[in-house]
Image: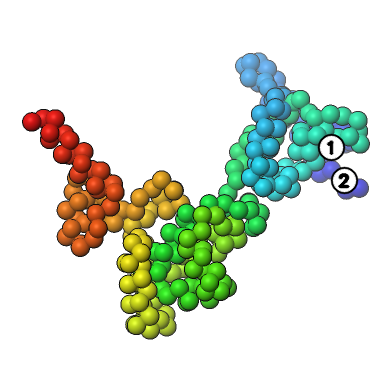
Amino acid sequence: MNERPHGYARYRLDGCRCYVCAFARSQYDDNRNRAVAYGTWRPWADAEPVRIHIRHLQSCSMGLRAIAAAAGVDRKRLQAIITGRPERGTGPQEKVRPALAAAVLAVEPTLDNLPACTVIGATGTARRLQALITAGWPQHHLAVRLGMSDANFAATLHRERVVVRTVRAVRGLYDALWRADPREHGVAVQRYSRARAQAAANGWAPVGAWDDDTIDDPAAFPDWTGRCGTPAGDAAHRRLGQTVCQPCLNARAAVRREAGAAA
């Protein structure tokens, strides 16, 4: 069994009285006494909110090992909160240290910590691929880079849900290509033009129509003109020869309603 590192726990649990352990104990006592004097001493926190949060993370396909790694705590500590320690005859913990509670409650499911096979919404994935095609990248070229068949790639453009592995791969591809000119990377002019025409026929939004904070939002609309959703957006669409988007139609209708009400 590995020895505990020198510090407060070794002082208390192993009886070590070396300088490092004694100093750690002294710091602990000083902090505790100061907190008690100011009425801020909270050595324990309710475990129930932590338990509920762990259950929520598990419902997002995060296992205890992944949660523990994201929180920077030992998995057995989480197990004790959820089911207790049957080998010790103890049930689920009722209290936990505040630092542990804060670390676990700070964990949120993200692309960085979700299992690769977790199924999530495909909105941002489809928009990124469509934007690259709008920029002139042929579907076959993108499929090869992603290690997909042409048929699988075409289906991904319209899927409602994909696995996290695909989302990560598409984000990486998008970050690598969104500013690049396909013609400077081996794409023939004819295939470049065909990709752009296909995107235009499908009404797919270009890279510049999305911000990082909107491209994954299913409720967001692309900003085609830089003025979409404002009264000026309608005229901007027409100058660019584009179909007027719904936010601009709504803004134009709102202006007409206001004008009618003022008349």
Q: CA distance from mark 2 to mark 1?
A: 9 Å
Tell me if I can see residue 69 in this picture. Answer: no
Residue tagged 2: 3
As drawn, the label of residue 108 is none
Residue that appears at 16% across and 60% down: 239
Residue 64 in picture, x, y percent from top left: 73, 44
Q: Are marks 2 and 1 in contact (CB under 8 Å)?
A: yes
Q: How many marks?
A: 2
- Which residue is at the front of the view, 111 or 118? 118
Residue that appears at 52% across and 69% down: 153
Residue tagged 1: 10
Q: Is residue 49 above or below residue 7?
A: above
Q: Is residue 116 above or below residue 14?
A: below
Q: Amino acid at mark 2?
A: Glu
Residue that appears at 65% across and 35% down: 53
Side (left or right) of 198 relative to 50: left
Q: Secondary structure at mark 2?
A: loop
Identify the image quadrant of the C terminus: top left
Q: Amino acid at mark 1?
A: Arg
Side (left or right) of 127 relative to 224: right
Q: Secondary structure at mark 1?
A: helix
Residue that appears at 87% across and 29% down: 90
